[in-house]
Image: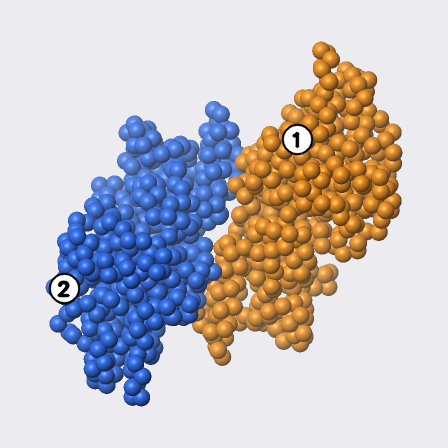
Chain colours: A orange, B blue
C-alpha cells in the first residue's frame, strides 16, 4: 500500500472504516493479513445477516417489509462507515402470496398436504378449486400431452433433481417451476402443483417465480413439499383406476405498481478516474423466510469484504456495494440499476447469491484477455482451497449492468450441495449458516476485492460469456 | 419347533400366515433363519408404514381420520392372516387443533413466526390476542416468577434440549411443554409460547400434549419452531428496554365425547392355557403429519415380528398385537385396554414407539426373577448389535395393562438420537425411515417374540420398575 495515499485518505476524504493508518505511524495490515484475520474472526458478515434476519425478517419485493430492509441496511452501512449511501427507488408490479395456502387430497386417500404458491400464481379464490389431478413425471411428458387434454384438471409435475456442488441441477429441474404452469395452462389445466424444486426431505415447500407469457392467463400454481410430492406419487401408484381428486386453495394477489429500491454505498477510492469495483447481492427475500442463505449472507459477505479491504488503507478504486431490490420476482432492481447507471463504466462486477457455504472455484471472463490479473487472483485465493477454472464467468442475477456494459465479471463459486435444501423455503433461517464457511467466503472476497480495487490497469473483459449462464442465474 | 404342533396348526386352526409347513413335508425355517431373512428383506413393516402414511395420513385421536386408520389397519391385518381381529371402541374427550395457527412479532422487529398449538391448548378466538412477551430461559425461571407477575402477558419458555441416544433429554426438556403453560397460567399469563421440545433446526414446530390441572383454566399454548425460538431470543438480546409485542392466533376446539378404538389381532397359539405375548404400538398420530416415526413404524415392526414368527410354525402362546388408539392425547387406548382386559393375564408386554432407528439395548423387568430367560433373549439379539442392560424395563405408553397386572415387560430400546428432530412435527413422514434400520428392528423383534411365544414356563416379572419410566413414556 502507498503510504501517501493512505494519509490522504485518512485526512481529506469522508472515509471512516475502522482500520486505517493512525497518526502514530503504524503501518496498516497487509491484504493477506486482513484476509487471514477474516478467516478466523470476521464478524461483519455474521452481524449483517444476523441483523437483517432478526430485525427485519422476510422482505418480499415491493412490500413494506422490503422498505424496512432498505432502511435497516442503509443504517447498517452508515454505522460501518460506508460513504455515498443511497436508496435508488424504482417502480415495480408487485405480487403478494396472500394468507391461505392449503391443499388436500379428497379421494381416494383423503389427507392434507403442505403447499405454498409460486410467484405470479393466480388465486383460486378463498373457496378453492376441486378437480382431478393428472401426473406428469417430467417436463417432457407434460409437453407431450395433447392440447386440451388437461381441460378442467390440475396438472402435477415431478422431476428428478439431485444435490449438485455447482448448482447445475437447478437448470435441470428448474423448468418444472419456471415454465410448467404456463405449459399446463396452455393445455387447459385449471391449476398446477409441482414437486418443489429442491433436494431436501423437509416438510417445507420451495416457492419461486413462475412465468406466464403475455398470451397465457395465469392459473393457480403451487409447490408441494418434497415429502408430500413423494406421498402423492405413491398415491398414484396405489390408486389403480381410481381418480385422485385434489382441493386447492391459494390466495395470492396483485398489488399493482409499488416502489422498491436499490441500496448502494461506497468505500471511496483515491482515484476517481478509475471505474469502481461493483459488489452485488440482493436484499429482498421471499415472504416465507427471513432470507439468511438467500441472500442475507451474500449482502453480509460483500459488505464485509469491502470493510476488510478498507482496513488495509484507502483503495485506488472505489468499491461500490449494490444491495439490489426485487431480485427474486424478476430482477427488477438489477434492470433498474443498469438502466440508471449504464453510462458510468464499472471495472468489474462480482455477486454473492448462492448461500454461505465455502467458495471452491474461481472464474472470470478475462482469463484470455487479461491472463496476468486472472492468474494473480487465482493464485491469491488458492490458499483458501479455491481452484482456478477455465469456465467463463457470467455473473449473478444483479449484475445486469456488468453484462450490459460487457464489463469484467468474476464468479466466486460457492459449494451448492445443500443450497437447494433451503432455497426459497421457510427453512432459510440464520441457524443454517456455518460461521466457519461464511468467514471463508469473506476471506476469499476480501482477497479478490483488495487486489481488484488496487489494480491500476484496465480490467477489460473479452472472453465469451456462456449463453446459458445468465438465463439460469437470472431465475435464482 | 414341534412338527406335530405345526401340522395341527396348518390344518385345524384359522391360521393363515404365509410361511407354514406344507404337505410336502418341508421343515419350516428356524427362528434364526427367519430373523436373518427379515434383516435383509423384510417387507411387512415397510408395507404397513408406507400404507398407513399414504392411504390414511394424519390420524388425530377421536376423529374420523383415526377411524379410517382403524378400518385400514384391520384390513391390513386380515390380508396378512391375523386372526381374531377386532376394533374395541372406547369413548374419549376430543380436542382438535383448528385451522388457524399464526404468530407474529409486532414490535420492535415485526416479522411472522411459525407456530402450532399444543394439545389441550385453548383458543385465542379467530381475532387472536396481542400482548407483551416475557422471556423465561428455563422452567426454574418460570417457577420463580411471582404470582400475578404475568397478568395480561404472554410467557415464552425456553430450554436446552440436546439429542440423546436414550431419549433422556425428553425428560429434561419435556416439562416446558407438559407443565409450562399451566404454571404460566397460574401466574396470570394469558397465553404461553414455548421453544419446541425438539432437537432439529427445521422450520416446523413440535406439538404434543400439555396439561391443565382441573383448577386451572386452559390458556392458548403453542410451540414455535426452533429457528423461530432462536430468532425470538435474539430479539430479546437486541431489544434493550423495548417491549416485545406478539400477536397470537390459535383456534383449537373441543369436540366433546367421541369414539376412538383399539385394534387387536392375533397369531393364535397352540396352547390356549398359556397367557399371550402382547405386542403394542399406537395407531393415532398428531394432525400435522402422517405419523411415520410416531408410530406407523412401531405398528409395522410389531406386526412384522408376529408374521415372521408365524413363518416358523404355530407358536405355543398366542401373539396378540395391540394397535392402540388415542395415545398421543392421554393414553386413552392404553387405559381402556387395561380396563377391559385386566382379568386376562398377559405373559409379557413389549411396545415399539420410538421411531424406526436401530435397537441398541435390551432391557427386561425379569433379569433378577427369571435370569435364564433374560439371558437367552439377550444372547439371541446380541448378533444384531443389541447390548444387554441392567436397567429395569418399564414399558411403553400403551402397556398400562402390563404395568397394572405387574406382568413381565421388555423394552427394546431404539436409538433416539434423531427421534426428537421429527417427533410431533409435520416432518414425521415416510422418507425419514431408513429401511435398513427398520429391518434391524424387525429382526430383533422377531427373535425376541419368537422365543417368548414358545416359552412354556411362566414369564413372571419381579424386578422393581423405575418410577420415572412410565411418567416420561406416558407423555410420548
Q: Is residue B92 visible?
A: no
- What is the quadrant of residue A179 in the picture? bottom right
**From the viewer's perspective, is B386 left or right of A252?**
left
Up the image or down, A273 lies above or below A376; here it is above
Picture residue at 63% right of the left edge, 43% below the top: A358
Q: Residues within 10 Å of mark 2 (few under 14, many from 20)?
A: few
Chain bearing tag 1 is A
Element type where label 1 sits in the image: helix
Q: Is residue B331 left or right of residue B114?
A: left
Viewer-closest of B96 and A305: A305
Chain letter for mark 2, please: B
Task: Give the structural element (helix, strand or loop) at label 2.
Answer: loop
Identify the residue at image location x=81%, y=51%: A465
The image position of residue A40, as x and y in percent, is 60, 32
Image coordinates of residue B417 in percent, x first then y, are 40, 49
Quarter of the image where the N terminus of chain A is located = top right
Instruction: Specify few, some or many for label 1: CA neighbours under 10 Å numbering under 14, 14-19, or 20 or more.
Output: many
Identify the residue shown where x is 63% and y is 76%: A149
Please name the residue that numbered disc 1 is placed on.
A36
Image quarter for residue B427? bottom left
Q: How many callouts does the rendering have?
A: 2
Vertical placement of residue B227 versus B237, above or below: below
Question: Quick check: marks 1 and 2 in contact, CB under 8 Å?
Answer: no
- Can residue B313 be seen? yes
Residue bearing the label numbered 2 = B458
Q: Position of residue B150 (x, y in %)?
A: 34, 31
Amino acid at each position: 500500500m502507498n503510504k501517501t495515499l493512505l494519509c490522504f485518505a485518512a485526512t481529506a476524504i469522508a472515509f471512516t472504516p475502522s482500520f486505517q493508518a493512525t497518526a502514530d505511524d503504524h503501518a496498516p495490515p497487509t491484504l493477506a493479513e486482513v484476509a487471514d484475520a477474516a478467516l478466523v474472526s470476521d464478524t461483519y458478515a455474521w452481524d449483517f445477516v444476523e441483523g437483517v434476519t432478526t430485525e427485519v425478517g422476510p422482505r418480499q419485493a415491493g412490500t413494506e417489509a422490503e422498505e424496512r430492509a432498505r432502511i435497516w441496511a442503509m443504517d447498517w452501512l452508515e454505522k460501518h462507515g460506508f460513504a455515498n449511501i443511497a436508496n435508488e427507488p424504482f417502480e415495480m408490479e408487485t405480487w403478494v402470496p396472500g394468507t391461505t395456502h392449503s391443499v388436500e387430497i379428497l379421494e381416494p386417500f383423503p389427507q392434507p398436504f403442505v403447499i405454498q404458491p409460486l410467484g405470479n400464481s393466480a388465486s383460486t379464490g378463498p373457496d378453492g378449486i376441486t378437480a382431478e389431478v393428472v401426473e406428469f413425471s417430467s417436463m417432457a411428458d407434460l409437453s407431450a400431452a395433447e392440447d386440451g387434454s388437461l381441460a378442467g384438471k390440475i396438472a402435477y409435475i415431478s422431476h428428478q433433481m439431485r444435490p449438485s456442488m455447482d448448482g447445475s441441477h437447478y437448470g435441470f429441474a428448474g423448468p418444472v417451476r419456471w415454465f410448467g404452469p404456463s405449459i399446463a395452462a396452455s393445455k387447459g389445466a385449471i391449476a398446477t402443483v409441482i414437486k418443489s424444486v429442491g433436494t431436501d426431505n423437509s416438510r417445507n415447500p420451495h416457492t419461486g417465480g413462475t412465468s406466464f407469457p403475455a398470451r397465457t392467463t395465469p392459473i393457480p400454481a403451487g409447490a408441494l413439499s418434497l415429502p408430500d410430492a413423494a406421498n402423492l406419487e405413491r398415491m398414484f401408484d396405489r390408486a389403480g383406476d381410481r381418480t385422485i381428486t385434489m382441493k386447492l386453495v391459494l390466495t395470492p394477489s396483485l398489488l399493482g405498481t409499488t416502489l422498491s429500491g436499490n441500496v448502494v454505498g461506497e468505500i471511496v477510492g483515491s482515484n476517481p478516474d478509475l471505474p469502481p469495483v461493483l459488489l452485488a447481492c440482493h436484499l429482498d427475500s421471499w415472504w416465507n423466510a427471513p432470507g439468511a442463505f438467500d441472500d442475507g449472507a451474500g449482502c453480509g459477505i460483500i459488505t464485509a469484504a469491502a470493510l476488510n479491504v478498507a482496513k488495509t488503507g484507502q483503495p485506488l478504486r472505489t468499491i461500490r456495494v449494490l444491495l439490489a431490490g426485487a431480485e427474486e420476482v424478476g430482477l427488477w432492481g438489477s434492470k433498474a440499476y443498469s438502466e440508471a447507471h449504464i453510462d458510468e463504466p464499472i471495472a468489474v462486477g462480482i455477486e454473492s447469491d448462492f448461500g454461505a457455504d465455502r467458495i471452491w472455484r474461481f472464474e472470470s471472463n478475462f482469463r484470455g484477455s487479461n491472463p496476468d490479473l486472472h492468474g494473480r487472483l487465482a493464485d491469491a485465493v488458492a490458499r483458501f482451497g479455491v481452484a482456478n477454472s477455465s469456465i467463463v464467468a457470467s455473473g449473478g442475477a444483479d449484475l445486469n449492468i456488468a453484462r450490459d456494459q460487457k464489463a469484467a465479471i468474476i464468479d466466486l463459486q460457492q459449494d451448492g450441495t445443500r443450497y437447494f435444501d433451503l432455497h426459497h423455503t421457510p427453512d432459510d433461517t440464520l441457524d443454517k449458516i456455518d460461521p466457519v464457511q461464511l468467514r471463508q467466503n469473506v476471506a476469499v472476497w476480501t482477497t479478490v476485492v483488495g487486489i481488484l480495487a488496487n489494480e491500476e490497469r484496465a480490467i477489460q473483459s473479452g472472453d465469451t460469456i456462456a449463453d446459458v449462464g445468465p438465463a439460469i442465474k437470472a431465475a435464482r
